[in-house]
Image (cartoon, rainbow, N blue to C red):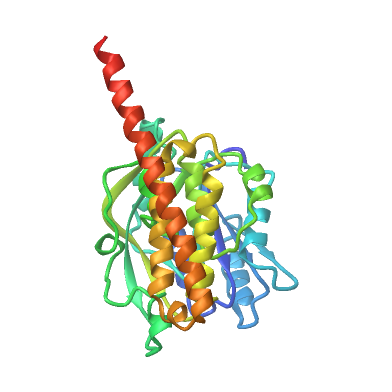
Amino acid sequence: MDDIALSIFVFSCNHAQFVEKCIRSVLEQKCTYNYKIYVFDDCSTDGTAEIVKKLAVENPGSISFYENEKNMGVLHSVRKAIGLPCKAKYFAFLDGDDYWCYDGKLQAQIDFLEANPEYSACFHDAEIYQMNNSCDAEFIKKTKIGWKTYSQMNKYYPDFEPQMLVTRTIIPTSTLVCRWKNLESFMHNYRFKEFSFSWALELELIKNSKFRYFNECWSVYNDHVGGISKRGSLFDFKRNNINILKSLLEDDFYRFYAPEIYQTICSEFRMMIKSDEGLRLSKREYRKLLSEYRGYQRKEIKAEKRQFLHDYEYMNEQKI
């Protein structure tokens, strides 16, 4: 196990329709680095576990399978993955309903990280395969309808800095290859819902570092009704994002990004205010939401002012 360069953690729950293609896309990688696949299934009832077990028998030594006896949620599976005793130099997460579509993906990404130690991770663009046909307006807002790639929705730069994550630039989970970092403390202290967990994890991984972006579509995201991001209401999703952002203000690293944090909090509030769910609130509840939004607008202005003055004083100190 000591010679494993990359651990690939696959998380599945009722992904029988997708999981074989997902795992085979990993097994088919043409890579000179040794890697191992760890599949964590959250008590699937559709035959997912049987498919994974069959693949494990066909590929001895390449796949380790962990199965929850009852449904515990993806965060439970992530904690199990992070707690494994065998630590590789790099790791990658892959949802069981997505897959990689380029067999040189791992080689390219690990080669880059080996040559560039100042980067904590690297990622790439992803195709979006639309599987939703719902006419429900609120549901459609949670899908990627109308988009064919993530780069059509998000603006990426070759050097991807922390503030880009703070402002909710989305990185597809299936695209990241990361340097191993001790995440047990992060997982122990994580107190939010699973909706935006990948984003919260990326915010932890990029601290004091940066990511590299490759302008290539090397994976496919299946946008379907059973995805994690489709669970719960738009309000729950946005409120959870706001709580994650507020927690960053308590982090010594992210305090520097207070203006961007407040700006993003306000953006999340605007989506709630303009949503069908928001407009169906009682007048009292709606005014309360508006008042909360205005409070964060004021905080954003104050944080920006502090940042402008800080920048001004710093620049003038350099002239002395």
The residue positioned 33% from the left and 30% from the top of the image is 309
The residue positioned 63% from the left and 70% from the top of the image is 53
The residue positioned 27% from the left and 18% from the top of the image is 316
Residue 193: x percent and y percent?
A: 60, 63
For the question of whether residue 159 can be seen, the reply is: yes
- Farthest-out residue, right: 69
- Farthest-out residue, bottom: 135
Image check: 176 left or right of 6? left
Most foreground residue, 12 or 57: 12
For the question of whether residue 122 can be seen, the reply is: no
Quarter of the figure with the N terminus: top right
Q: Is residue 135 above or below residue 219?
A: below
Q: Is residue 204 above or below residue 227?
A: above
Most foreground residue, 107 or 278: 278
Q: Report how many numbered discs are placed on residues in the image.
A: 0
Residue 247: x percent and y percent?
A: 56, 48
The residue positioned 70% from the left and 73% from the top of the image is 71
Residue 297: x percent and y percent?
A: 40, 54
Most foreground residue, 178 or 190: 190
Image check: 124 left or right of 75? left
Image check: 320 left or right of 165? left
Q: Is residue 137 above or below residue 127?
A: below
Quarter of the figure with the C terminus: top left
Residue 33 lies in quadrant: top left
Residue 132: x percent and y percent?
A: 39, 83
